[in-house]
Structures are given as C-alpha cells and as structure tokens.
Image (cartoon, rainbow, N blue to C red):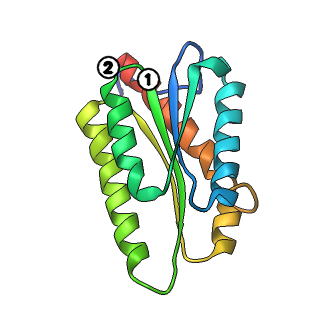
C-alpha cells in the first residue's frame, strides 16, 4: 500500500503581493497586449493595483539588468519580464533572444526572486500576434500565472 505523498503546489493568489512588471517599448503594439493580459491576471487574482510597479525599458536586451536591479531591492515578491523579439533578416535575433533569456534566468537564480518569463521570440509578426491574445492565448497571462504559482510554492519550502 502506497503511503501518503506530501505535495507542495502553488496557487493563483496575488493577495498581498508586490509585483514589478518590466516591459519593453520595442514592438510595443505586441508588448502592450502582454502587459494588459498580465495586469488583468494579477488583478483578477487579488493584487491591489498600487502594489504593481510597471517599468518600461527600450528592448529585450535591457530586461535582465532591470530584473536584476529590481530583485536586488527586495521590495518585490515577483517580477514579470515582458517583451517581443521578432526575427528579421540578420542573426541579431538569435543573439538578443539568447542573451535576454540567459540574463533573465541569471537574475532570478542569483536573487531567489521569481521572474515570470514573458519574452516572445517569434519568427513572424503573425506568431507574435497569436501569442499576445489571439489563437495561442496571451503569454503575459501565462507568465503572470507561473510567477504567482512559483511565489506561493517558495513560501511553503
């Protein structure tokens, strides 16, 4: 007979949390939809609007630095990194995506502050639109939900 398993799981509850949202201005026609979805998700799950700080940065390459600085302040329970990089005709896309992703992960690991990863890396504008609120859902919402669950799991450890 199997013994009872101890399960630690997060929940979608933003009550009492302070969250920083770092969003890029580049491709803002996509990013603004990610931000809107993320803010709606946080508010539907109990956060008070004054407990959200929105920081705008030029592009995806700047996301890691801002995530790191905000996490170092120890004022936020979680951080959301939102942006959109769309492939062009040069290798620039590959470098930006790789460095932004690594940097955001490093900021999270070094600080111990959960960072919701909402950086779209798409081949086409159509793919980005699909992931910012149409066919493929809204990745801003998904990043916010993942961050909330991670915060609540960490509280139990």
Bin the neighbour count of mark 2 within 10 Å (Cα to Cα): few under 14, some 14-19, many 20 and up.
Answer: few
Which residue is found at the position 46% from the left and 23% from the top? 152
Q: Quadrant of the N terminus?
A: top left
The crowding category of the residue bearing disc 1, from other C-alpha atoms within 10 Å (few below 14, some 14 to 19, many at least 20), is some
Q: CA distance from mark 1 to mark 2?
A: 18 Å
Secondary structure, mark 2, is loop
Indicate which disc, 1 or 2, sits on the residue closer to the N terminus. 1
Residue 143, visible in the rendered structure? yes
Q: Find disc 1 in the rendering and name its residue.
A: 76
At 70% across and 54% down in the image, what residue appears? 137
User: Image height check: is 40 above or below 28?
Assistant: above
Q: Name, please, the residue furthest toward the bottom.
A: 89
Residue under pointer 2: 157
- Residue 97 coordinates in the image, percent (x, y): 40, 65
Asked if residue 46 can be seen in this view, the reply is no
In the rendered view, does 85 fall on the left or right side of 30?
left
């Amino acid at each position: 007979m199997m013994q009872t398993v101890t399960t630690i799981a997060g929940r979608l509850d933003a009550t009492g949390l302070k969250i920083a949202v770092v969003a890029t201005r580049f491709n803002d026609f996509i990013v603004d939809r990610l931000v809107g979805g993320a803010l709606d998700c946080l508010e539907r799950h109990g956060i008070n609007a004054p407990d959200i700080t929105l920081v705008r940065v030029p592009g995806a390459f700047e996301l890691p630095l801002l995530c790191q600085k905000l996490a170092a302040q120890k004022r936020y329970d979680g951080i959301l990194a939102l942006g959109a990089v769309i492939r062009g005709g040069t290798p620039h896309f590959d470098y930006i995506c790789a460095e932004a992703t690594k940097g955001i992960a490093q900021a999270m690991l070094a600080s111990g502050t959960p960072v919701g990863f909402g950086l779209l890396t798409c081949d086409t504008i159509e793919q980005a639109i699909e992931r910012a609120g149409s066919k493929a859902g809204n990745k801003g919402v998904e990043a916010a939900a993942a961050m909330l669950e991670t915060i609540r799991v960490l509280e139990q450890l």
